[in-house]
Image (spheres, rainbow, N blue to C red):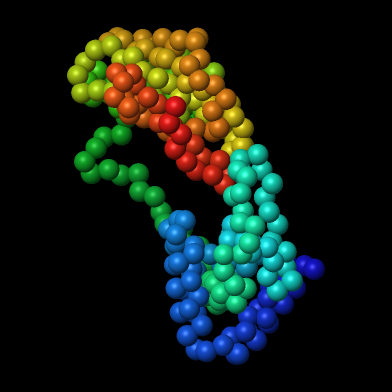
Amino acid sequence: MSIRSQIYLFGLILFVYACSSPPKKNEDGKQLAKTYCGSCHLLPLPSQLNKETWLLDVLPKMGPRLGIHSFQGMPYPIQHLASVPEGYYPSQPVMTKEDWAKIVSYFYEEAPDSLEQIDQPISTQLDRFEVKTPKYPATSPPVTSYVKIDPGNHAVYLAHGQDLKLRSYNQRLQLIGEAQTPDVMVDIGFQDLSKPGLRTATLLTMGALTPLDVTHGSLQRVAIDEKLKITLSSQVLIDSLPRPVNLQEADLNNDGKLDFVISRTWTVVTQLAPR
């Protein structure tokens, strides 16, 4: 069945459902969406997507997470990914089919047929700042994966996600230090950057830049001296991290040793992982 036919069929089904339901059906669906959808993430507005996208893409992906595997004869496929933990999808529906139909009806009927595309011009004029472009290798497209301002050393640290380099710039935005990273670098667990001095910290890489569910992330030590020279240790502290994106260091159990708190983002799982 073509997408056009599916939309027509579901539109007809929802029209029949609307005629046989009380006038407050969409209000019921809205409240149900707040209860079930809003308990996991910010509740989106139906107006943010068109009818087709809600009906054939978003809702079929959300249904299995509530134990709903079909709607009006349309199967909702489960994403079989390495990042999906056991028990992620409920074995039994957490709501009735009637309640799910109200949620579908709410998003479908309140959504526009199409989205109006408004191209806002981007102004390049700044009234409080002067734009300065640092000398930057232009051998590949700009894929910045990390930016950090070091006020104590009057420096900027910048990582490139394609040529896999961590670079340091002084306050004149002159390139000073450079180090090759094993993978795409996304964070450094700095402590206090308010005073000048040697920076010793932990560098976090996520693996591939492409959003794949792979366990190629790693932690290793990095040092940046007052002259902004970067030295990256070859010793890997932790490897095989599942797509980490953020790192914090703290002594969580008061044993005098720093612990790593790492957040990760896979296709269907986002979580903190103390190490």
Image quarter hosting the C terminus: top left
Snapshot quadrant of residue 136:
top left
Please determine whether, in this image, residue 240 is positioned above or below residue 130: above
Q: How many discs mark residues in the rendered view?
A: 0
Q: Nearer the viewer, residue 137 or 164?
A: 164
| Residue 99 in the image, given as x and y percentages of width and height | 56, 74
Q: Residue furthest right?
A: 1
Q: Nearer the viewer, residue 174 or 266?
A: 266
| Residue 24 in the image, given as x and y percentages of width and height | 47, 85
Q: Nearer the viewer, residue 81 or 130?
A: 81
Snapshot quadrant of residue 173:
top left
Left or right: 164 as drawn, with respect to 231: right
Can residue 239 be spotted in the picture? Answer: yes
Q: Name the residue: 65% across, 78% down.
A: 11
Q: Name the residue: 22% across, 20% down.
A: 152
Q: Nearer the viewer, residue 107 or 29?
A: 29
Image quarter hosting the N terminus: bottom right
Q: Name the residue: 24% across, 18% down.
A: 153
Left or right: 5 as drawn, with respect to 54: right
| Residue 50 in the image, given as x and y percentages of width and height | 56, 67
| Residue 254 in the image, given as x and y percentages of width and height | 29, 24
Can residue 133 be spotted in the picture? Answer: no
Please determine whether, in this image, residue 249 is positioned above or below residue 201: below
Q: Name the residue: 58% across, 61% down.
A: 66
